[in-house]
Amino acid sequence: MALLLFGIGMVIYRVIIARALSVQFNRGMVQIFATFGLAIFIRGAAQFAFGGEFRSITHTWLADRSADLGGVFIPLPQLAASFVCLLAFAGLLLISRTEFGRALEATREDRDAVALLGIDRDRIFTIGWGLGAAAVGIAGAMLAGFYYVSPNVGANFAIIAYVTVALGGFGSLAGALVAGLLIGEVEAITAAILEPSLKQVGVFAIYLAVLMFRPRGLFGKL
């Protein structure tokens, strides 16, 4: 799944995003609307192909199993998903320390200046989009093991993902990890104090507080 979405991500950049970035005026808005329209198209295509009802994967070798960690029982599907996602994060962290990772960071900060240094920005962005799509594929595959999925399920997770990145700080992988752990703890505490359906109230409250006093996020570079 990750390899398939890696290729799809590169194709999307070449066909859609590269054209959006090539415009001379309102480049940022054009890219936002292009990706927003792409999201609507993908959601509609998934609904057409698979229907709009919720589905789940129940017959797996980890289903209905749990691990006893010091008296705390954790379902194995969630534990396995956490382990795989941490491995994926470690992989991204290693990539960020390579020559490609440094080139991607430089291209993100100033896509025009890196062209003067001989860096092929389109190639860098193409691979970057592929890596992003692959990460989404890994997350989606892990999520499907213990969560109901439908064509519209991604909207809520997209909001949480944005809050996680903004809270940790744009451009900081370590910040995204810390923010993700913080959001998980805040959700659990909020669900214990308030109704479980209101567990995201604490998350957005902390996000607004950080936004007011540290707009760049906890470890922001921008």
Image (cartoon, rainbow, N blue to C red):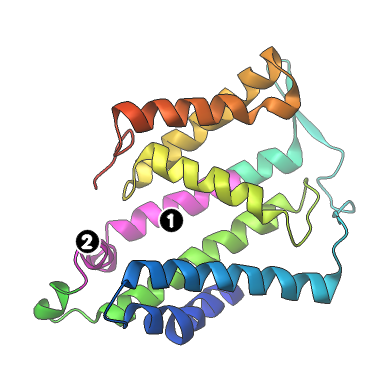
Which amino acid lies under the numbered mark 2 shown in the image of this protein? Glu
Question: Is residue 170 highlighted in magenta?
Answer: no
Residue 147 position (above or below residue 20): above
Name the residue rendered at 47%, 82% in the picture.
Answer: 16
Q: Give the main secondary structure of the magenta stretch.
A: helix
Identify the image quadrant of residue 187: top right
Residue occupied by mark 1: 91
Q: Check the picture and name the quadrant holding the N terminus.
A: bottom right
Q: State left or right for residue 185 relative to residue 196.
A: left
Q: State left or right for residue 4 relative to residue 92.
A: right
Residue 40 percent across, percent down from the top left: 64, 69
Q: Residue furthest front?
A: 25
The image's mark for residue 109 is 2
Residue 85 position (above or below residue 137): above
Name the residue rendered at 39%, 77% in the picture.
Answer: 126
Give the secondary structure at mark 2: helix
Residue 79 percent across, percent down from the top left: 67, 38
Q: Does the image show residue 2?
A: no
Residue in front for this viewpoint, 156 or 132: 156
